[in-house]
Image: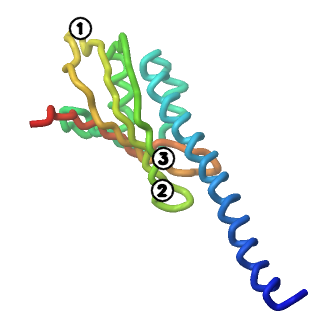
């Protein structure tokens, strides 16, 4: 092989590894977005078993009203809240490291809490997903009301 051809080999290998890494990361992004959607659907369906299986034991949630909840309180919320309609859009995944990522989206939810209508308006939603014993679980979730642009 000529010297100039030898210089091409490492560049091609780096390009191939970058593509493979990108494809693996895209597959993980899709997995995490799928988990996020599954969590929302399980909450809407009041499927405590499926929902709980997607959460770490020490997970926390900050409600749109700014209240911090533990896993037990989140599961209690599920019994109090009836979701009649939800729309999720604009999913994005930001990686913290190989075992943790933040999934964000915009959510529009309609329903009731203890018989009273939920506040109207969109929220910016974010969840931290961590890989624990080979499974991706939600460790933290927050919904922040989106304020109208001035």
Q: Are marks 3 and 1 in contact (CB under 8 Å)?
A: no
Label 3, secondary structure: give it: strand
The residue positioned 75% from the left and 85% from the top of the image is: 7
Q: Which residue is identified by label 3? A: 129
Q: Which residue is identified by label 2? A: 95
Q: Are marks 2 and 3 in contact (CB under 8 Å)?
A: no
Q: Position of residue 124 (x, y in %)?
A: 29, 37
Left or right side of 13 for 129:
left
Left or right side of 35 for 9:
right
Q: Are marks 1 and 2 in contact (CB under 8 Å)?
A: no
**Mark 1 neighbour class, 10 Å CA radius: few under 14, some 14 to 19, many 20 or more:** few
Tell me, for residue 148, which label it has, or none.
none
Q: How is the image coloured?
A: rainbow
Residue at the extreme top of the image, as rendered: 115
88 or 3: nearer the eye?
3
Tell me, for residue 115, which label it has, or none.
1
**Dot placed on the residue nearer the N-terminal end, 1 or 2:** 2
146 or 38: nearer the eye?
146
Q: Quadrant of residue 144?
A: top left
**Dot placed on the residue nearer the N-terminal end, 3 or 1:** 1
């Amino acid at each position: 092989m000529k010297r100039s051809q030898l210089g091409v080999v490492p560049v091609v290998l780096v390009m191939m590894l970058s593509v493979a890494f990108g494809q693996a990361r895209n597959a993980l992004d899709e997995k995490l977005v799928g988990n996020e959607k599954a969590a929302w659907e399980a909450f809407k369906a009041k499927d405590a078993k499926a929902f709980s299986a997607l959460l770490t034991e020490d997970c926390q949630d900050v409600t749109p009203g700014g209240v911090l909840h533990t896993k037990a309180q989140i599961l209690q919320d599920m019994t109090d809240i009836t979701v009649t309609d939800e729309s999720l859009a604009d999913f994005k995944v930001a990686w913290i490291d190989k075992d943790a990522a933040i999934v964000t989206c915009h959510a529009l939810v309609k329903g009731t809490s203890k018989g009273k209508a939920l506040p109207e308006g969109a929220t910016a939603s974010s969840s931290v997903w961590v890989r624990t014993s080979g499974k991706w679980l939600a460790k933290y979730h927050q919904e922040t009301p989106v304020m109208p642009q001035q």
